[in-house]
Amino acid sequence: MEQKAKKCIQTSFPSRLGTEKTAMELIEPFLQQAGASLSRLEDIKTLVSEACLNAIEHGNAMDERKSYRLELQYEDNCLTIRVEDEGGRSRWSKSPQFQPIDRVMETDGEPRGWGLQIIDQLADAWQYHVSDHGTRFEITVNMQAEGGGGLSEYRS
């Protein structure tokens, strides 16, 4: 069995809407080099975008004086995505409860607020840790699999 070397990229962005799109563009060559299939590449870009938007909107409360950090680490077909904000204790207080998307549309019809549900469906596993310094969100993706497993964990 061939082992691939550990690869990592890190960067930070101001908490401004639109930087999640820049993050998606930035990571694409890294993911292609790591061997992501086209469908998995799009899944991962969506995961990164949703995690960045959570940091911007919920963690840093759209405060452009704050920033968030993005890190991708790839080793042995496993990709770990980390997004950390500077928001202090955010609104994350307990593990989220999900409803099927068709039920959400029946009840409120609002096409927002689905970020964690999307992450839960596309990731193989994810967790977040809330502290007084901010929220660290970590997503794990098997680069060879299609779709995710939806295993979530909350730690405070």
Image (spheres, grey):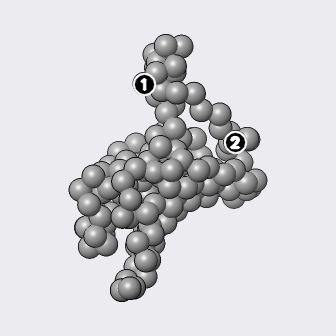
Circles 1 and 2: CB atoms closer than 8 Å:
no
Left or right of 119 on screen, residue 136: right
Comparing labels 1 and 2, the label whose residue is closer to the camera: 2
> Quick check: 138 above or below 33?
above
Q: Quadrant of residue 111?
A: top left
Query: Mark 1 highlights which residue?
Result: 111
The residue carrying pointer 2 sits among few (fewer than 14), some (14 to 19) or many (20 or more) residues within 10 Å by Cα, namely few
Q: Which mark is residue 19?
A: none
User: Marks 1/2: CA distance?
Assistant: 21 Å
Q: Describe the element under mark 1 as helix, strand or loop.
A: loop
Give the camera-side residue of 146 and 114. Answer: 146
The amino acid type of the residue labelled 1 equals Pro
* Residue 42 picture location, percent across and down: 30, 51
Mark 2 or mark 1, which is nearer the start of the sequence?
2
The extreme front residue here reads 1
In the rendered image, the quadrant that contains the N terminus is: bottom left
Q: Is residue 93 shown to the viewer in this render?
A: yes
Circle 2 sits on which residue?
Answer: 95
Which three-letter amino acid code belongs to the residue tagged 2? Ser
Image position of 155 (left or right of 51): right
Residue name at image x 52 percent, y 19 percent? 103
Question: What is the total number of numbered labels drawn onto the structure image?
Answer: 2
Location of residue 132 in the rendering, given as x and y in whole percent from the top left corner: 74, 55
Please name the residue shown 69% across and 42% down the image: 95
Q: Position of residue 31 (x, y in %)?
A: 31, 66
Left or right of 9 on screen, residue 99: right
Residue 27 point in image, percent of width and height = 32, 63
Evaluate whether residue 53 shows in this view. no
Residue at (30, 57) in percent of width and height: 41
